[in-house]
Image (cartoon, grey):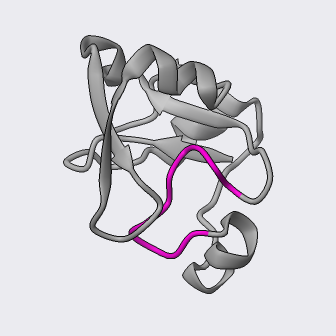
Amino acid sequence: MVFVIPCAYELDLKKCAVASGNKRVELIAVKELLGLTGYIRGGCSPIGMKKKLPTYFDESAELFGKITVSAGIKGCQLLVDRAEIVNAADAKCVDITQ
C-alpha cells in the first residue's frame, strides 16, 4: 500500500490498518523500496510505480486545490491538482496521521 502524508506529519500505522481494512500495517525496509516501487527513498511518487498499489492520501489533502508530491526523483516535486492526482492514483482520502 502507499500512504501519502504532508511532510510535517507522522504516519499512524494503526489508522493505516483501519483505513486499508487490515489487521496491522508495517513499513517495508528501505532496501526493498526500489524493487517494489521502482523508486528510491526520497523519490517515491503516488503515481508511476512498477505496479499499481492501493493508495491513500491523508484527509488533510482535501483542504487544498493543489498539492505537491514527489516527481519520482529525490529532490524533485510536482505541483498538481489534488483531485486529479487522487483520481489518477485511484486513491482515497482518509485520516492516516497522528
Determine whether 85 is above or below 11 in the image: above
> Where does residue 25 sit, x and y in percent of width and height?
66, 51
Quarter-of-image position of residue 74 = bottom left
> Where does residue 18 sit, x and y in percent of width and height?
64, 30
Quarter-of-image position of residue 58 = top left
Considering depth in this image, is 65 or 6 the residue closer to the camera?
65
Q: How many marks?
A: 0
Determine whether 8 is above or below 31 in the image: above
| Residue 69 left/right relative to 39 | left
Considering depth in this image, is 45 or 55 the residue closer to the camera?
45
The residue depicted at 44 percent of the width and 44 percent of the height is: 12
The residue depicted at 70 percent of the width and 48 percent of the height is: 24
| Residue 60 left/right relative to 45 | left
Asked if residue 93 is among those painted magenta in the image, a careful observer would answer: no
Instruction: Magenta stretch: give its range.
Output: 39-49
- The quarter of the picture where the C terminus appears is top left
Considering depth in this image, is 59 or 72 the residue closer to the camera?
72
| Residue 57 left/right relative to 56 | left
Asked if residue 45 is among those painted magenta in the image, a careful observer would answer: yes
Considering depth in this image, is 58 or 97 the residue closer to the camera?
58
Quarter-of-image position of residue 4 = top left
The residue depicted at 59 percent of the width and 44 percent of the height is: 47
> Where does residue 65 sit, x and y in percent of width and height?
28, 13
Can you name the residue that lies furthest to the left here? Answer: 8
Determine whether 31 is above or below 91 in the image: below
Determine whether 80 is above or below 52 in the image: above
> Where does residue 49 sit, x and y in percent of width and height?
67, 55
* Main SS class of the magenta portion in the image: loop
